[in-house]
Amino acid sequence: MKIIVIGKSGQLAWELSQLSSVKHEIVCLGRKDINLNELLSVSETLKIHKAEAIINASAYTAVDKAESDIDNAYELNAKAVGHLAQACKLLSLPLVHISTDFVFHGDKGAPYLPNDEINPLGVYGASKAEGEQLITDIHPSNSAIIRTSWVYSAHGNNFVKTMLNLMNTKPELGIISDQIGSPTYAKGLAEACILALENKLVGIHHYTDTGVASWFDFAVAIQSIGFDLGLLDKKIPIKPISTSQYPTPAERPHYSVLDKSSLVNALPELSFVHWQTQLQTMMKALKADQS
Ligand SMILES: NC(=O)c1ccc[n+]([C@@H]2O[C@H](COP(=O)([O-])OP(=O)(O)OC[C@H]3O[C@@H](n4cnc5c(N)ncnc54)[C@H](OP(=O)(O)O)[C@@H]3O)[C@@H](O)[C@H]2O)c1
């Protein structure tokens, strides 16, 4: 299969590019290669590349900036997604699209199921929710939406790399302990996207690594593994703080653990790994990149 991935320089796109093989040719397109603002340009570009399947890994992911940059967030997370869905429908192409736990409010108190009511707290979540709806309306029979959370990779910007930088430069850290979710290594998410295409997955599903954590738990694990691997030469005190002690422009869900059972059933070959194991694997890759 020739798979076109949209969002060339992002974390997920990079992990997908590493999965290119004899079985699947994976070509990543960046904003210079495809104009997502124009439907005609999207369909022409997909035709030129002889696409057989599409994975949309592009998004406006700056959650706080989106609160004041509303038009641009909707342009990419909703309108562009609509264009991709229309182009895929026109060309009869399967589409895998990635969405987010931030479509949920966070007050359920139990893992969210794919069909649970959505109620985003901010512009990022609302714009991603509109993108989901467009795909469901336009191209339901040949598309899958995979919601995920707290994504990181050795390539790109993310919480793990931010923490390592802060741990190397600050005397101590206060990290939020009252927001609960599931960290997700983008490498596993990339494998889920490929299996979704191979199995003609349709509908909305959830994929994260297993286990749950607060940002504080996540930071403590990053420091412990980072120190053991020699990515950090000392440990600093990390104290738990509440969301109210760290105000941000965008409100975030307090609890956004995603129930993965529909994907466990639909893709039996897909492995689900605990976030602490995945974190070790990613940080070893980071260490290998540095040496
Ligand atoms: N990161 C997370 O914690 C998280 C959590 C839940 C869900 N997700 C979802 O997972 C997916 C992958 O996230 P990620 O972390 O890999 O994202 P990322 O690293 O922020 O990458 C996003 C990509 O979108 C591209 N992009 C932005 N504007 C574009 C435009 N106008 N045209 C084409 N491409 C454009 C970016 O290109 P430039 O580099 O050129 O800007 C970048 O390559 C997204 O759908 C995201 O919403 C992420």
Image (tube, rainbow, N blue to C red):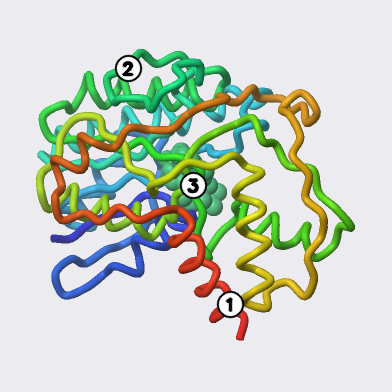
Quarter of the figure with residue 13: bottom left
Which residue occupies 50% across, 74% down? Answer: 285
Q: Is residue 154 above or below residue 30?
A: below
Residue 31, visible in the rendered structure: no
Mark 3 surroundings: few (<14), some (14-19) or many (≥20) residues within 10 A:
many
* Residue 181 spot, x, y in % from top left: 50, 36
Tell me the kind of residue under disc 1: Lys
Q: Residues within 10 Å of mark 1 (few under 14, many from 20)?
A: some
- Horizontally, is 193 left or right of 59 in the view? left
Amino acid bearing label 3 = Pro
Q: Which of disc 2 and disc 1 is earlier in sequence?
A: 2
Q: Residue at x 62, y 28 (%)?
A: 66
Residue carrying label 1: 287
| 168 and 14: which is toward the camera | 168
Name the quadrant of the N terminus.
Answer: bottom left
| Distance of label 1 from label 2 (alpha carbons) | 40 Å
Please name the amino acid that badge 2 sits on.
Asp
For residue 77, which numbered disc appears in the image? none
Q: Quadrant of residue 90?
A: top left
Query: Could you tell me how far apart the alpha carbons at marks 2 and 3 are, in whole angstroms?
Result: 21 Å
Q: Which residue is rendered at x = 64% and y = 74% of the image? A: 228
**CB of mark 1 within 8 Å of CB of mark 2?**
no
Question: Is 190 drawn above or below residue 207 in the view shown?
Answer: below
| Mark 2 neighbour class, 10 Å CA radius: few under 14, some 14 to 19, many 20 or more | few
Q: Quadrant of residue 99?
A: top left
Residues at circles 2 and 3 in contact by the CB criterion of under 8 Å: no
- Dot placed on the residue nearer the N-terminal end, 1 or 3: 3
Horizontal and vertical percent for residue 186? 42, 55
- The residue at the point 58 percent across, 77 percent down is 287
Residue placed under numbered mark 3 in the picture? 183
Q: Please state the horizontal and vertical placement of residue 18, each as a whole percent of the image.
A: 35, 69
On the image, numbered disc 2 is attached to which residue? 116
